[in-house]
């Protein structure tokens, strides 16, 4: 009888299904615009008569904004209502997408990508908290599995649409495609997501300013060194950003309403889960970027053909994620998330061992499948562990902190990829490779692949640290919660 009741509690209600569908759509839109730009950068660079040093900020600007704002906007969701902030994110993101497509110079496009990042931050920061509000503790792994499915569908669609639209329609349509999706999402979001305010507090403006300043200075300095070159000015910028971090911590510890409640990190499972997410993002998420450099530059593939090689991993990840989320509900997150991290690590080592300037394309497919399955195990179980170990009045802060650390990791991952590639060969040649020059000598192709191998080694070391953090999070078994809810 208990088993039947437990099964009943695991079933989602119509309200839960509708909320989950809207959150998936928001997650998908946010993910689309991380990957859809990757394959279009060469065409955008040529069409807007600029250079890669400028156009790379189309990617970085979006990631920088979501890294800076996600924690703060999760806090805003806690204060003013998570549903309101999530739906506002749809509105801002959709409008900014239309403006991005209409841009006629690189500076306009970067500026509107910043606005688009604000919309993406609103959705990212509040999506996890909305799931935690809507689902019981023992159901959240399954729910986060579906949101992970939304992310992987978005990432897959971004790569596919980026390749197809850039090849057959033109780069502005990689942004225009968001408009009909966004309009539909806005309708269902305002209809079904109506979470109310959870806490009556004040914003921590000094803490927000300090955190934003630290992240901006560190990121701007690091990206500038990777793209332009090392200089004392950029080093000082990074050091200034690092120096602000202790100031931020002091402000937060004295604040009655901190932007980041460091007390949350006293929970070992929550702290190590967030640490593992950071290391996973730092160690892997720019690998797709550098593989696209390889496919379009060294191998001379079109955006569409390059996209086809990257799709299988995303498809498998999307299919497996909900199932992996349900497993984490039954058995806890540690084993499933750690195995997922090790599979991603194995994919990176596989690239290191077998990728050459003339390697068969099935190697790319095998590696993406391996990493895709790993991602389907890691993301939903790790996200579920974070939200399951946050108190109810801190869901927004925990969700925002998780996304912030992941976004900072993504930024760092791009810095590592760009820096190592530029160290392997001259920046001008590295940029020519990414922009699709196909008449490079075999010597340069080999040098660039050697640089990629250095990236793979660094990434593998970071992912190993992430796997260790995942193991050290401790044992967690949420099956008992399902029985108690029977």
Image: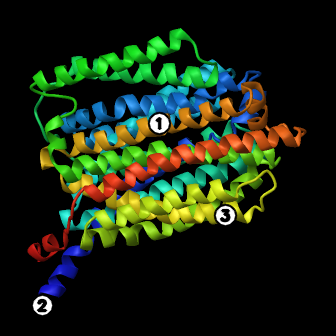
Identified at 62% across, 34% down, the residue is 420
Judge left or right: residue 450 versus residue 276: right
Q: What residue did someone put label 1 on? A: 93
- The answer to whether the residue labelled 2 contacts the one labelled 3, judged by CB atoms less than 8 Å apart, is no
Closer-to-camera residue (56/1):
56
User: Which label belongs to residue 30?
Assistant: none
Q: Residue 418, image x and y in percent?
A: 61, 33
Numbered disc in front, either 3 or 1? 3
Left or right of 299: which side holds 310?
A: left
Cβ atoms under marks 3 and 1 closer than 8 Å: no
Asked which quadrant contains residue 477, the reply is bottom left
Number of the front mark, 2 or 1? 2
Between the residue at mark 3 and the residue at mark 1, the CA separation in whole angstroms equals 32 Å
Task: Classify the position of the C terminus by image quarter.
Answer: bottom left
**Mark number, residue 365:** 3
Q: Dot 2: what SS? A: loop
Q: Secondary structure at mark 3?
A: helix
Crowdedness of circle 3 by 10 Å Cα count: few (<14), some, many (20+)? some
Distance Cα–Cα, label 2 vs label 1: 48 Å
Left or right? Give the position of 440 relative to 36.
Answer: right
Residue drawn 71% across and 37% down?
171
| Image position of 288 with respect to 431: above or below | below
Which residue is more in the foreground, 97 or 417? Answer: 417
Residue name at image x 13 percent, y 26 percent: 253
Q: Earlier in the sequence, mark 2 or mark 1?
A: 2
Q: Earlier in the sequence, mark 2 or mark 3?
A: 2
First in sequence, mark 3 or 1: give its number.
Answer: 1
Percent position of residue 317, x then y: 50, 64
Picture colour scheme: rainbow
Residue at mark 2: 1
Horizontal and vertical percent position of residue 445: 81, 42
């Amino acid at each position: 009888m208990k088993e039947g009741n437990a099964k009943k509690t695991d079933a989602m209600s119509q309200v839960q299904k509708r909320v989950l569908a809207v959150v998936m759509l928001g997650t998908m839109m946010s993910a689309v615009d991380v990957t859809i730009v990757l394959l279009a950068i060469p065409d955008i660079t040529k069409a807007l008569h600029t250079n890669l040093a400028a156009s790379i900020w189309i990617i970085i600007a979006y990631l920088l904004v979501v890294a800076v704002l996600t924690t703060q906007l999760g806090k805003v969701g806690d204060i003013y209502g998570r549903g309101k902030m999530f739906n506002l994110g749809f509105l801002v993101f959709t409008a900014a997408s239309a403006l991005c497509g209409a841009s006629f110079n690189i500076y306009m496009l970067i500026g509107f990508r910043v606005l688009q990042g604000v919309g993406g931050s609103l959705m990212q920061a509040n999506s996890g908290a909305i799931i935690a509000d809507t689902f019981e503790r023992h159901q959240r792994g399954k729910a986060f599995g579906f949101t992970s499915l939304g992310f992987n569908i978005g990432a897959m669609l971004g790569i596919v649409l980026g390749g197809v639209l850039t090849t057959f329609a033109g780069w502005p349509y990689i942004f225009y495609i968001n408009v009909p999706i966004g309009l539909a999402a806005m309708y269902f979001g305002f209809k079904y997501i109506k979470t109310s305010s959870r806490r009556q507090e004040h914003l921590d403006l000094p803490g927000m300013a300090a955190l934003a300043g630290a992240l901006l200075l560190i990121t701007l300095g690091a990206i500038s060194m990777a793209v332009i070159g090392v200089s004392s000015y950029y080093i000082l910028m990074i050091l200034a950003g690092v120096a602000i971090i202790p100031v931020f911590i002091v402000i937060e510890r004295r604040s009655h309403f901190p932007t980041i409640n460091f007390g949350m990190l006293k929970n070992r499972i929550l702290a190590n889960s967030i640490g593992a997410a950071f290391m996973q993002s730092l160690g892997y998420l720019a690998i797709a970027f550098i593989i696209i450099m390889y496919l379009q530059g060294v191998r001379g593939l079109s955006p569409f053909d390059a996209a086809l090689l990257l799709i299988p991993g995303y498809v498998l990840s999307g299919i497996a994620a909900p199932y992996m989320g349900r497993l984490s509900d039954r058995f806890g997150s540690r084993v499933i998330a750690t195995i997922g991290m090790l599979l991603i690590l194995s994919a990176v080592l596989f690239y290191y061992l077998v990728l050459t300037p003339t390697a068969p394309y099935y190697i790319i497919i095998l590696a993406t499948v391996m990493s895709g399955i790993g991602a389907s195990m890691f993301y939903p179980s790790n996200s579920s562990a974070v939200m399951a170990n946050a108190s109810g009045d801190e869901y927004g802060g925990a969700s925002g902190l998780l996304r912030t650390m992941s976004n900072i990791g993504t930024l760092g991952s791009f810095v590592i990829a760009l820096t190592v590639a530029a160290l392997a060969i001259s920046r001008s040649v590295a940029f020519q490779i990414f922009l699709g020059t196909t008449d490079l000598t075999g010597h340069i192709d080999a040098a660039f692949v050697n640089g990629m191998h250095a990236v793979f080694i660094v990434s593998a070391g970071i992912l190993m640290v992430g796997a260790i953090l995942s193991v050290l999070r401790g044992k967690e078994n949420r099956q008992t919660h399902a029985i108690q809810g029977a």
